[in-house]
Image (cartoon, helix red, strand yellow):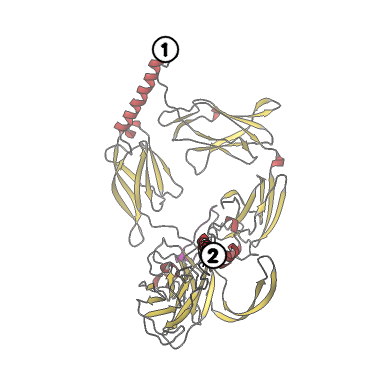
Amino acid sequence: MNIRNTIYAAFALLSITSCAKMGSPDGGMYDETPPKIMSTSPADKSTNINTHKISINLDEFIKLEDAQEKVIVSPPQLEVPDIKAEGKKVVVDLKDTLKENTTYTIDFSDAISDNNEGNPLGNYTYSFSTGNQIDTLEVSGNVLAADNLEPIKGILVGLYNDLSDTAFTKKPLLRVSRTDSRGHFIIKGIAPGTYRAFAINDADGNYRFSQKSEQIAFNRDSLRPTCGPSLRQDTLWRDSLHIDSIRQVGYTRFQPDNIVLLAFTEEQTDRAFLKTERQEPNKFTIYFSHGDKNLPKIRGLNFNEKNAFIIEPSQKNDTIRYWLRDTILCNQDTLRMEMQYMMTDTTGLLISKTDTLEVLSKESYAKRLKQKNKKYEEWKKEQDKAKKKGEEYEKVMKPEFLEPKYNIPTTISPIDIMTIEMPSPLRKCDSSAVHLYAKHDSLWYNSQFIFRKKVGTPRTYEILGEWRPEIEYSIEVDSDAFEDIYGLISKGFKGGTKVGNLNTYCSLFLSLEGVQDTGAIVQLLDKSDNPAYQVRAKNNHADFYYLRPETYYMRVLYDTNGNGVWDTGLYADNRQPERVCYYPKAIECKAKWDVTLSWNVNATSISKQKPIDITKQKPDKGKKRANRNAQRSKKL
């Protein structure tokens, strides 16, 4: 080979080497195949089985996610089974004694996936029987929160073939499942027979209702599982936008498949003393787990309790606030007292009990006095400085003032009510010092109004005016109008508001069907599922006036006892919670519109009523096979 050929060969070799280094080698196709079950021991759907250990063998290495939450063994196991992944297999070790002639199901949901790409096996259920046959019936449905129809995720659902009311409190559930993120459940492996369905957030793991704090649901009606052939539509897509064909596909339908359980937590009627709290020196609060018609009796041990308090109990008498009248008593760091109250004993009866309490102020009097002196020294320093400069200065430090909270918005509707909240109980409330003026043709005139205490809300007063459209109003309060029990006096106040034009509002007229309870309450809800407006239906009609133009949602509460609020259920009395229904669509209210609706509350299944826009418990995204090969091909 001559020199020229040698040089050409060297350049060619260098060129090939450089090209090889420009890109990294491709790793090949990704694994998108989910793991496959190769064998099980004992075989799936085997009969006359007495072993506690089950092995499920797969064709590749796998991982098991959230086994304690996702894997459900039925009948329920009082002793938690050991479920784990070992290389290419899943091993289940049942710790409880196996029942005779019983079908066992192990529902893995989507807990099994391959170890590399996370491709899920899919919803897989293994079953075997200790008898000579496998029970294959199923029932399904949904569990919703009774007060707002929210799907409940992860609640235990089960069946009893004992139809007595005591079964739920005495025996563990016979067969169980757990709801998914949509509140949906399927109970499998059921034998023919008659059952009752229940749900429970099982706090103590005994598979029965044993604590009043446990959220539960129950149906009064019994059910008989059945199955039979049926048809459903199967849509074949040409691509993501176009349907290729729709065909009828045969399948086995298990019924009932529309069970709805409405879950609630019973009102805690057991009464116990919880704690005392004294965040501020002039008041302390006593907390109970439940109220009683009789308030506690307080006897002071290091003070005289007679006429010492202004008492503010909560609506249910479970939280009681005591305002100390005397400032000398406020400055006492520790209040020792004897409290006599009613409590629930171990048999469930109310008995009298007496406790000795030491109620300590969060900040000591010495610390508060130090802060007060510091504040005075700072004020005095500023006044001395102003005096030396020949500027105006104060000779006496201004006293503290009572500072009410005036809830007066700049714009109101003709049905709004304004309020004034007092920070402490009043010794004097001069209603004649409260004025309302209306502006007509640039002149201000006295306007009629009502000033009154707000029922059920301590230290709050209402201003009810004859609010007329497009009129400006001025609310004025004279100084010294209010004086609290500590001698603090309010300053003067002036606030303005204006009523909008009628064309800025809308109205809604509702006709109800299927509501048998004349005490039904209709609520318009905002986008956070909170009530914005509320009226009581009359003759199956509910009218809303002066609505602000927004998107609303709607629900109706069956106020069976007429107390104006939703009430929970009570299992011991076989009492369901008060019914709640949701209008299944959003309601668009626009300015100057009158919206007329007719709503049959039974037209839509209760499990499909609540609009997804205001449903807080959103469905989880299902685990899917990795689709990385399509992305790789597109990239290449």
* Magenta span: 563-575
Mark toward the viewer: 2 or 1? 2
Residue 520 visible in the shown view? no
Considering depth in this image, is 48 or 578 the residue closer to the camera? 48
What element does badge 2 sit on?
helix
Q: CA distance from mark 2 to mark 1?
A: 103 Å
Q: x%, y% of residue 628? A: 54, 66
Considering depth in this image, is 474 or 537 the residue closer to the camera? 474
Q: Is residue 255 above or below residue 491?
A: below
Q: Is residue 443 magenta?
A: no
Which residue was labeled with disc 2? 5
**Dot 1 amino acid type:** Lys
In primary-sequence order, the first of circles 2 and 1 is 2
Residue placed farthest to the front in the image? 2
Image quadrant occupied by the C terminus: bottom right
Q: x%, y% of residue 69? A: 43, 67
Residue 108 visible in the shown view? yes
Q: x%, y% of residue 381? A: 37, 19
**Dot 2 amino acid type:** Asn
Dot 1: within a 10 Å radius of its alpha carbon, few (fewer than 14), some, or many (20 or more) residues?
few
Q: Is residue 564 magenta?
A: yes
Question: Across the whole image, how many numbered discs are drawn on residues?
Answer: 2
Tell me if 601 is positioned left or right of 331 in this view.
right
What element does badge 1 sit on?
loop
Considering depth in this image, is 48 or 308 the residue closer to the camera? 48
Q: Are marks 2 and 1 in contact (CB under 8 Å)?
A: no
Checking the image for residue 389, the label placed there is 1
Magenta span main SS? loop
Residue placed farthest to the bottom in the image? 132
Considering depth in this image, is 578 or 72 the residue closer to the camera? 72
